[in-house]
Every structure is written in C-alpha cells, then in structure tokens.
C-alpha cells in the first residue's frame, strides 16, 4: 500500500541525513562523548534518582503527583526484558493482560472482556500522546524512552476509555550528538532478535532518529496431528523514524514521527485442559486431543496477521510564559486471522476475522509555566475512527435436537457471518489546575466534558443448520443499526499535603467514562456508557537519605453500568452473544510499592496489590451449562474477571566490580493468586495461584559501550493460562502463556 510506506520514506531520509552529518561530527565526538550510563536508576552516593512522569501533561516528580503511577524507563525495560504489555503486567501493580488472539487489558479489574469493531477499551493506550483506538493494533516496545502506567480512572486529562487507567508509551527522542546502538539476541525456540537505532543532529536546529526491530521465534507449541497444519511462530517487524526541529536556545519544538509494524503469530490457538470433556461427542472419527501444555492437536491452519502504521506531529510553541502544544495523529491498522475454536483436531469450529480501521485525532493544550502558586492546563480534543469488521464464525451448538420421541436431527451447527461498519466521533474540552494554598498544601481541580457519537450498521447473517440435512438452514440474523450519542462530565478533585520535604499524603475523587457501544448484532439493544466514581488516598515518601522510596494507595470504586459480555435474548426467540450493561460493581483494595538502594551497588524493589472487585447486581445466562436453553444465573457477589486478589512482585540486583568489568546479576519473583476468566466464578476454568522466577546476568566493561547479558524468563517452566474461553455445553479451551525462555544478548552503544 503506497501510503503505508510513509514510515519507510521518513526513516530512510533520516538515516541518509544521519550518515552525512555523522562523518562531519564523528571525529570531534569520539573524544568528547562519554559512554551512556548503563543503569538509569544509578545515582551513586546520592541514592535514588528522581523519577519524572508526564501523567499530568507536564514533567513532574512522580512523588509529587496525586495519582498512582508506575514508570519504567529505557534501562529498566532492557534489564527486565520487557518487550510487550504481556511482560509489563508483572511490573505494574494491578495490571493484567490476557490474549487469545485478541488482547484484553485490565487495571484493578476494570477493562474489556471481548474484542470487536464496535467495542471500546477500558484501559487507554497512548503512543507518543496519541490514543490508540484498536486493541488489535500492533504495540511494539523498542527504542523507547519510557512506559508509564496510570492506575485508576483518568477521565479529566485523558478522557474516554480510561476507566481502568492508561498506559503511556513514549518513544526515544532525537539527539543533537551522534549516537548509534544495536542489540543482537539469540534464544531457545530459535529466537533471533535484532534491534538498532541511529540518532544525531542534521544542522540548523534539525535532528533525526531512526530505529528498527526484527524479533522472531519458532512456535512454543507443536502440533501432534500427523500431516496436520504447521503452527506458525511469532515474528515482529517494526521501523520508526523521528524528525525534530528545535532552534538553539529556543523552547520551540516541532516533531514528526512515522512508524510501521507487522506482527505474525498463530493467534487464537486453543489448547485442551479438560480432556475428553472439551471434545464434541459428534467429532469426526479419528479426532484427537492432548492436554500437554507444550502440544496442540489442530486441524485448522491457525494464523494471525496484524499490520499498523501511523503519523504523529507534535508542536510545542512558547507564547510568553505559556506553552501551546498540539498533538496530531493518524493511524491505520488491519487484522486478518483464521483460528480454530476447538481444542482438538476437529476442524468444524473456527472463526475468520478481517478487521480494518483508521483513526484521526487532534488535541490542543495550553499550559502555564511551573512558577508561582497556580499551575494549569486547558485543552480541546477531537477523535474520529472508522472501523470495518468481517467475522465468520462456525461452531457446533448441540449434538442433536429431538424433533419428536425416537427421532432426532444430526449435530446442530451455528454460523454467524457478521459485517460491521461503524464510525465513532468524540469531542471534548478539559482543564485542570493545581493551586498551592501554602508551601505544603495544594488543591487540584479539573473537569472534562465529552460528547461521543456512534453511527453504523451490522449485517448479521446468522443461521442454524442441521449437518444431517433434516432441518435445512434456519436463518436467525438480520440487520442492526446504531445512531447514538452520549455526553459525559468527568471531574477530579484532589488534596495534596507535604508532611515533610520528601513525604506527601493525598486524597482524590475522580470520575471515569467509557462510551456506549452497539453490538451491531441483530436483535440486540445498544449498550449504555459505563461510569466509575473513584476515591483514592495515598502516601508517597522517601527516606534514609533518599535511599528508600515507599508509596501506598488505597482505592474504592463505585462502578455503574459496566459493559459485560454474555448470551443475550434477541427478542425473537433467539439467543446471541453480545455486550450488556451489568447493573453495578464495587472495586476496592490497596497497593504498596517499595524501591531501595541501601548501597550504591544494590537495588531492591517490591510491590503488593490487594484487589476485591465484585458485582453488586448482575444476572446473566450461562451457555456453558446449556447452549440451547441457557439457565439464568444470579451473579451478585461474584468476582470480576481478571481480578486476582493478591499480586506480589519482587526484584533485586547487585552491580559487582570484577577487575575491569561490572557483573550485575538480577533476580525477579512474581506471585499471582487465583484468577477467574468469566463472571461465573468457575473453579473449573480458573487460573490457580502461581509464581514465576526471572533472572538476568549482565557483564559490561567499566569503560566502554558494550554489554553482554544472559537471561531466563519463567525459569520454573510454569504452565499457566493467559486466558480461558468458556464455550457451549461444558466445552472450554485454554491459552497458555510462554513457557521457559532463555538466551543471550549483546548490546553496543556509541
């Protein structure tokens, strides 16, 4: 596609320009440039360094903001091997990521339980300040400056779809000094990773940066079906180019970013963990299955292909003591997949997905300076998205249907061919101010008004048919349309008080909003917006000469009209899967985080999250028990999906000088308690409590710009679920996370 090559053209131009300018600068810089520090947390005798975040749309000390935020900078991403949000979840309290071909992200139990063209996320992902509307978009963690995880509703400054929180991904910026680097890695499952960047000045206030990645490995699971389809491995390819203009001595910054990514995998690869109970009794002769987590039995050629590209243009313009900031973004992405719905070699249940989307967003912010008692930001936001999804699903819903005593049909198959075409538009104005009543006491107040509009159509060609041909085809679909709009007012109020120079307590009230949606499935009603009132109180402290940092936060959510997925009556006697509004839920808990550097060479970190997330009032039908006549179940008091009660993260590393090199071993431990994947709180399909161990050994010279690292993840080779799909009539399939992986990486940077 011609437009999708924009990232390559920009990256190529940057690379040529860098090569030209680099020859003129290399000799002078060879003596003047010092090697970059190996560890961003390294602070020498000064203890922990200040952690700067941009959660409030300006650079601030993380210990001075009244919200729960975890920042992981470039050095931490590298030393912990964080390459995706699946890795990130074990470093940010309250974050849970699951995937079964589609991605599900929750924070403190709040998120989205099902993908789709008309579905909105509950945790906002922003790349270089641009909101990413599609959960299916490729998110590649390479050449980053940092990742920030904001826990709790961010309805004022981030707006829609941040009821659970937000993940801010910030790419590395161009530098005026010439800098180049590369990472080459090899691991088990024939993993090969190549990552590189180049950055430098072009003259006249211009600078550029180009980065790319290739990361691929063989499949983690082997197909045991003789002459069966090959299970593809995973392969990520990405390139990003950044061109920046900032005149010497000026605060004016103009930045253009172009990126392009592709990701290929097996996608939804169901595995059997219930034995014969997860195989249809009417499966064809010779159908096989396996409950080995390292094996699959598949007769469907599973494959998922994702492609995304985007352009981002940011401007920061000084206007006296104010700053005008504009953020313009355009993105396109596509997702094509063929995936089995059966955890056996039975090829009759599968789904085809073909989803495309494009989005445009424009945000304008006006910020005060950081001087004086009052700091403020006001802004306006516009977002437009057009998504088209084509979904073809086929599955066995019943083994037979009795027409009259002594005479039954053959197996009944359900087929849904659904085409959804939906346009979403959002407008918002917002503002937030912090006023210092005294040198120690501050008040934060903000508000956002949002209007969301959705317009679209869904053509639902659903049908039931008897494989034996007795009944023929019974159409149950039709056309569904949506033309709705919703308004939301999402304020925030917080109080901050400094008990000491490095100790702050705070309390806040904020509201989160996720717009309504339409299932765009025949016979189903539009779904109302969901809202959260969140109440937080926290402590942030540094002590022992800045060698320890302790953060504690407690929270309580009043969660109304949450959008839950289930089997819904279509009003014409039929049943269909879709979203509905659960009446209410309550989410409460607390999180504690500790960072410590007792001596310059030793770094320790620990976090604990306690979460109690339950439905107050919710009734749903359970097709797992019976697909044709699902019973209605009262779910009051049940736990929200993907809401583990306890989560513990521990890490330690020590930098030991051995001769002319520094040897740094690092060990990480993760524990997560039992977690349910559906609102029915079924022990049979839950992930039991598990623990993981990761380790890394890095060797780097005292003077030089290279490092060598040995790493291992999930060292105990724990088989645990990323998610579980509960199908009809007691059939369920699991999707296992990565097994034990290990390898070696060589890095160089000049």
Image (cartoon, helix red, strand yellow):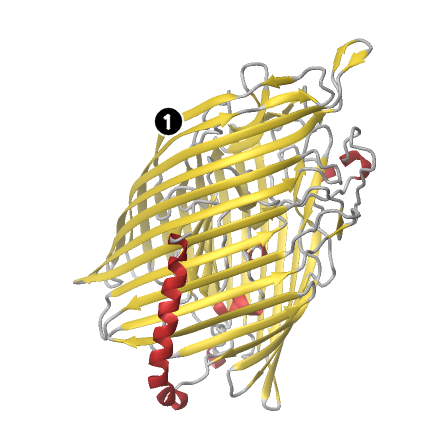
Between 647 and 128, the residue placed more toward the observer is 128
Instruction: Where is residue 552? Give x, y as percent.
Output: 51, 56
Identify the residue at horizontal 34%, vertical 85% (top origin). Answer: 25
Label 1 element class: strand
Instruction: Kindly tell me whether residue 61 is visible in this rendering.
Output: no
Instruction: Where is residue 29? Give x, y as percent.
Output: 37, 86
As displayed, is residue 517 above or below residue 360? above
Residue 190 as seen in the image, left or right of residue 148: right
Rate crowding at label 1 as few (under 14), some (14 to 19) or many (20 or more) other CA atoms within 10 Å: some
Residue 246 as seen in the image, left or right of residue 242: left
Instruction: Where is residue 721? Give x, y as percent.
Output: 68, 48
As displayed, is residue 680 above or below residue 612? above
Quarter assignment of residue 55: bottom left
Quarter assignment of residue 531: top left
Residue 722 as seen in the image, left or right of residue 321: right
Instruction: Where is residue 603? Give x, y as percent.
Output: 57, 72
Identify the residue at horizontal 44%, vertical 77% (top origin). Answer: 180
Label 1 sits on residue: 483
Between 429 and 267, the residue placed more toward the observer is 267
């Amino acid at each position: 596609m011609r437009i999708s090559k924009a990232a390559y053209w920009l990256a190529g131009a940057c690379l040529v320009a860098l090569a030209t300018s680099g020859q003129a600068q290399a000799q002078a810089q060879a003596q003047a440039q010092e090697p970059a520090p190996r560890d961003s947390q390294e602070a020498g005798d000064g203890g922990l360094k200040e952690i700067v975040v941009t959660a409030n749309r300006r650079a601030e000390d993380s210990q001075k903001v009244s919200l729960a935020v975890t920042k992981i900078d470039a050095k931490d991403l590298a030393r912990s091997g964080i390459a995706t949000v699946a890795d990130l979840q074990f470093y940010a309290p309250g974050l849970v990521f699951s995937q079964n071909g589609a991605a599900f992200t929750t924070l403190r139990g709040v998120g989205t339980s099902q993908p789709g063209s008309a579905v909105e996320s509950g945790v906002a992902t922003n790349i270089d300040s641009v909101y990413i509307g599609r959960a299916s978009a490729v998110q590649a963690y390479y050449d980053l400056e940092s990742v920030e995880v904001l826990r709790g509703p961010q309805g004022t400054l981030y707006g829609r779809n941040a009821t659970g929180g937000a993940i801010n991904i910030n790419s590395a910026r161009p530098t005026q000094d010439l800098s180049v680097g590369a990472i080459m890695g090899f691991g088990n499952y024939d993993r090969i990773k190549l990552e590189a960047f180049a950055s430098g000045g072009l003259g006249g206030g211009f600078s550029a940066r180009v980065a790319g990645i290739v990361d691929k490995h063989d499949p983690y699971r082997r197909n045991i079906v003789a002459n069966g389809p090959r299970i593809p491995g995973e392969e990520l390819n990405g390139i990003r180019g950044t061109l920046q203009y900032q005149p010497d001595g000026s605060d004016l910054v103009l930045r253009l970013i172009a990126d392009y990514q592709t990701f290929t995998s097996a996608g939804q690869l169901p595995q059997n963990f219930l034995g014969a109970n997860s195989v249809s009794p009417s499966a064809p002769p010779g159908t096989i299955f396996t409950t080995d987590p390292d094996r699959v039995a598949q007769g469907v050629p599973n494959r998922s292909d994702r492609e995304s590209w985007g352009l981002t243009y940011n401007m920061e313009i000084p206007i006296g003591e104010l700053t005008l900031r504009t953020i313009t973004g355009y993105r396109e992405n596509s997702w094509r997949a063929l995936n089995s719905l059966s955890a056996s070699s039975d090829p009759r249940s599968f789904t085809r997905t073909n989803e495309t989307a494009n989005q445009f967003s424009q945000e304008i912010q006006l910020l005060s300076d950081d001087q004086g008692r009052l700091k403020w930001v006001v802004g306006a936001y516009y977002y437009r998205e057009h998504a088209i999804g084509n979904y073809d699903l086929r599955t066995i819903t019943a083994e037979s249907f009795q027409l009259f005593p002594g005479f039954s049909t053959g197996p009944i198959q359900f087929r849904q061919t659904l085409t959804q075409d939906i346009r979403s538009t959002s407008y918002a104005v917002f503002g937030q101010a912090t006023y210092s009543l005294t040198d120690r006491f501050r008040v934060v107040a903000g508000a956002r008004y949002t209007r969301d509009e959705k317009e679209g159509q869904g053509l639902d060609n659903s049908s039931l048919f008897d494989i034996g041909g007795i009944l023929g085809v019974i159409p149950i679909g039709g056309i569904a349309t949506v033309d709705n709009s919703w308004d939301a007012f999402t304020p925030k109020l917080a109080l901050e008080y400094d008990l000491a120079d490095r100790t702050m307590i705070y309390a806040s009230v904020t509201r989160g909003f996720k717009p309504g949606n339409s299932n765009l499935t025949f016979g189903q009603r539009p779904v109302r917006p969901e809202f959260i009132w969140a109440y937080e109180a926290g402590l942030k402290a540094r002590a022992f000469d800045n060698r320890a940092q302790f953060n504690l936060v407690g929270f309580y959510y009043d969660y109304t009209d949450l959008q839950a997925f289930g089997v819904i009556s279509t009003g014409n006697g039929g049943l269909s899967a879709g979203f509905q509004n659960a009446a209410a839920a309550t989410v409460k808990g607390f999180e504690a985080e500790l960072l410590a550097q007792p001596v310059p060479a030793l770094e320790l970190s620990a976090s604990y999250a306690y979460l109690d997330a339950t439905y107050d009032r919710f009734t749903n039908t359970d097709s797992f028990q019976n697909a044709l006549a699902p019973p209605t179940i009262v779910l009051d008091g049940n736990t929200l999906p993907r809401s583990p009660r306890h989560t513990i993260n521990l890490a330690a590393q020590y930098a030991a000088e051995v001769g002319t090199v520094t040897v740094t071993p690092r060990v990480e431990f993760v524990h997560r308690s039992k977690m349910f994947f559906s609102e029915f709180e079924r022990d049979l399909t839950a992930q039991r409590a598990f623990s993981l161990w990761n380790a890394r050994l890095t060797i780097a010279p005292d003077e030089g710009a290279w490092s060598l690292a040995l790493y291992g993840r999930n060292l105990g080779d724990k088989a645990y679920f990323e998610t579980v799909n509960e199908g009809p009539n007691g059939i369920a399939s699991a999707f296992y996370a990565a097994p034990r992986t290990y390898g070696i990486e060589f890095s160089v940077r000049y």
